[in-house]
Image: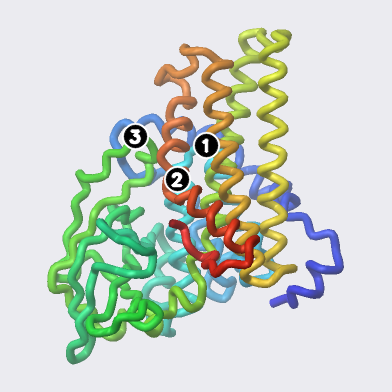
Amino acid sequence: MLDRNSLYASTAFDPAAVLEQPDLQELRQLAETKFRERGRAYDENCSMPVENIQDLHDRGWLMTTVSKEWGGRGSNLTTDDPATYLQVLRTIARGCSGTAHCYQVTNHTAWCIEQVGTERQKEKFLGPMRKKPFLGGFVGSEPKRKHMYQMTTTAKRVDGGYIVNGEKNYATNGETMGFAVIFAAIEGVEDYNQNHQMFIIEPDMPGVTMDHNWYRPNGMRAAPSPIIFLNDVFVPDENVLGAPGTYPRQRWQGRFHLGFTANYLGTSEGMYDWFLDYCRQRGRGKDPILQMRTGEMKIALDGARALFHQAITSWKTKSVVEAELISMSAKSLAAHVAFELSHKIIHAAGSTSLFDEFPLSRALRDLETHVLHAGHDRTAQIVGQSQLGETFDSTLQR
């Protein structure tokens, strides 16, 4: 692993250069053809993008964040390659935002398992990923949660493990996942830095049920995320991931800001490039108003791209908190640019472009839904707190 003050501080590290690699170029072609073509059926049926996931597995992308020792590509924010897994996510999103989110969630889960898990946990949950699309889920979300780290799902200590009760929602990859890392609060402990516990839940555990019919959103329908019900589920000690408070204390949530940024940016880029082709094919390129709107969109995208790449580099040149704050800014800007492009494209392209035969309406709905995952007013408040010298937590999504 490289010293953050050596290579990145002394050379012109370019996160965008990753996109020029042949395997990323091949992935972009795949995303903008096959992934985009399949998206309509996934969207209509609210179904897992199983063919896309298989294609990603066959090319080794489902373990991008995992070390080469464990069969992955060794790219995450703590290694000497912080860019590849994010640029892959961005590239997939050009064709299918839902598939990109499935990729994001399973890679984030695998990353945490490798860095926090025991050798047995790595063997059991990372080992199968080498052979087949064995997807992980990262499930912190739950109904009526008031704070990201304060769980209503509870865990009671018993001999040999814990009894877990609660309800978790937005369990991405739920339809096909091999396991899920869920968050719960240990009973009898108040401080979330001491009671927040990660558990590895397997779908066939007694007391685990899922509601696959609940997930019927406006967009992101190709990333099915059901509800998981946990009714007196016994989780053995061997499935307890890390010590109490590991997730908030190690600032894992702050590592995930750029995953959402990459999805917002990639989906916006795919939508914009499709818009350009649509207008060219209809001979509208000489329209001065269309030219102006197109230029405005390109300028906005250039700004979002630049800050995205600056944020990636910051994880090797800045302190962790500084990198988190820059990543939050990049995420917020990418979200605002996504909404700006959505508005301008539909007015410039016209109503016919929204017919189901075209991918535009799905991209718009995916962005409308996915951008709401993070609370962008809260993001701006946290960045503002940091500027005004007030107390803040730059790991928070909401």
Q: Are dots 1 and 2 in contact, CB under 8 Å?
A: yes
What residue appears at the point 82 percent right and 68 percent down from the top-left corner?
A: 9
Mark 3 burial class by Cα count in 10 Å: few <14, some 14-19, many 20+: some
Three-letter amino acid code at the position of disc 3: Asn
Which residue bears the numbered disc 3? 218
Image quarter where the C terminus lies is: bottom left
Name the one closer to the observer, 14 or 367: 367
What residue appears at the point 32 percent right and 66 percent down from the top-left corner?
A: 179
Name the one closer to the observer, 264 or 101: 264
What whole-number distance in Å separates the C-alpha atoms at marks 3 and 1? 18 Å
Helix, strand or loop for disc 3: loop
What residue appears at the point 59 percent right and 71 percent down from the top-left corner?
A: 68
What whole-number distance in Å separates the C-alpha atoms at marks 2 and 3? 16 Å
Q: Are dots 2 and 3 in contact, CB under 8 Å?
A: no
Q: Are dots 3 and 1 in contact, CB under 8 Å?
A: no
In the rendering, at what x and y percent does residue 99 appear?
Answer: 45, 45
Residue most toward the bottom? 159
Mark 2 or 3: the one toward you: 3
Helix, strand or loop for disc 2: helix
In the rendering, at what x and y percent does residue 246 appear?
Answer: 43, 79
Which residue bears the numbered disc 1? 95
What whole-number distance in Å separates the C-alpha atoms at marks 1 and 2? 9 Å
Name the one closer to the observer, 298 or 266: 298
392 left or right of 195? right
Which residue bears the numbered disc 2? 99
